Image (spheres, rainbow, N blue to C red):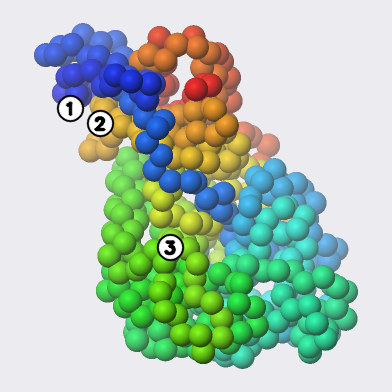
Amino acid sequence: MDNNVTGFSRRGFLKSGGGVLAGMMIPAGVKGLFVKEKASISVDVNDVRGMVAPEIYGQFIEHLGRAIYGGIFDESTGHFRQDVLSAVKQLNTPLMRYPGGTVTKIYHWKDGVGPVDKRPVRRNLIWGGEDSNHFGTDEFMQYSAEIGAAPFLTVNMNTGTPEEASDWVEYCNANGNSYFATLRKTNGHAAPYQVKYWGLGNEEAAKEDAGLLQNPGDYIKRAWYFAKLMKLQDPGIKLVLVGDTDEWNRKVLQEMHPVCDFISLHLYAGTQPGKPASLFSSIAAMEKRIEETAKLIHELTPEKVENFNKWYRFPCRQKPVKIALDEWGIWESGGTGDYGLEVKYNWNHALGVATFFNIFHRHADVIGMATWAQTVNVLAPIMTDKERLYLQTIYYPMLMYRQLCGDRSVAVKVEGPTFEGNPALDVSATTKEGVLTLAVVNRDPKEDIEIALNKRGDWKVYVLNAPGTAVENTFGQDVVVHGERVLKGGSYTAPAHSISFLRINI
Ligand code: AHR
């Protein structure tokens, strides 16, 4: 890339008033003079776009390949793998989705509770192999508690029944002497688990999975039945309804919005062979999907439900409908393991993950949760062999966004260079307890970008980077470089292919 400034704003982005904290001026008509690319970021901390739900930093595990057995759980000892547990714990995820994914469509929760040696071994008809059921509901609840995450369960709407789903709610949440509450107690768990989030199926438009052909009308009919029996068990549960195309979503929202706390979207980005920058175009297309779905929600669903018939015998939703990105991630071909799902992630993918988080911040008003698919070995930040583990590049933005970003998304505008059709910089601005955090991703593989900081004071800067965009971690090798420094304002140069968190008291 040369140093031309075409495409920049030729005006300063400086607003008067206290809101704008970072910005720069580029002299009109200047081309080719700068050593570095230049950009402007303007922030208005008084223009709050939404509260960032902590649940956007969720994770997902599925009975698939080495995700649970060999990843989370060690069959040879019958215990959680401690090395994996501490790596997952460190991620500090607030939400964990289970047991699928596609496997939900053949998964029967009753196989996975009770004395371990009495649990049936089932064939995993979706992903292959056998499932010992040694990791089931109670183990999942224990795992969630150990990592400090709220559990999120998806119910089987294909080979399962509404009654089975309702029994699962009873097993998890009831506190009386009823059959399934007693069964949980007999299994050694006196206190109810209070599972709040329940997914009504998974990708129910995909007839390839378990063979049940569902159009939106079929899904709506079944989902009402499931919702009803589950809510009668516990009226406080929050339901995630399956989304798909706009046409599907439109019908589901129209018919089911009174009980739809979340409508789900599954977003997997990918890279075209030999074109690393295409990952960012793919992610940009996903931001559009989020915007389109948000538009439908606003068009079709009232913030507050009126006149919900009392004879449903449970309350309607109390809050506006939100989007659940209950599977999001980067899915590349060429992986190993079952269905090629053990994907190696390089540093470009870490820049992609950071971009996704910025998108979630920018759309905080409508995104209620997001669970990265998945956690260990399958499309995962954590990889294992029998004895060891390593953290993939993508682990680090997951870790840092949770630690450093605020819970209030504020307006941010970026003007700067592009590379291969994408803006080089992707930025989110959040605040919390008087601290502004700018999360700045410079996706350009070659050019540093200078950003003026016209707010004086101590900017604390944390930088994640790597020697290049194609580098990857593996056992015994971690290529990710962590930096920290303090700036006094003036300007900040975001290094090529870096993720920077710039923080200042406001
Ligand atoms: O995450 C892997 C698979 O991707 C899930 O099982 C399915 O829901 C999605 O298509």
Question: Residue at coordinates 56% horizontally, 15% vertically from top-left?
Answer: 485
The local secondary structure at tag 2 comes to strand
Q: Does the residue labelled 2 lie within 8 Å of ligand 1?
A: no
Disc on the earlier residue, 3 or 1: 1
What type is the residue that disc 2 sits on? Thr
The residue closer to the viewer here, 200 or 345, is 200
Q: Check disc 2: other Cα within 10 Å, few if <14, some if 14-19, many if 20+.
A: some
The residue closer to the viewer here, 299 or 426, is 299
Q: Can residue 248 be seen in this view?
A: no
Identify the disc placed on residue 418.
Answer: 2
Q: Check disc 3: other Cα within 10 Å, few if <14, some if 14-19, many if 20+.
A: some
Please tell me whether mark 2 or mark 3 is closer to you in this view: 3
The residue closer to the viewer here, 287 or 436, is 436
Identify the disc placed on residue 320.
Answer: 3
Residue under circle 1? 7
Q: Are circles 2 and 1 on residues that touch, CB within 8 Å?
A: yes
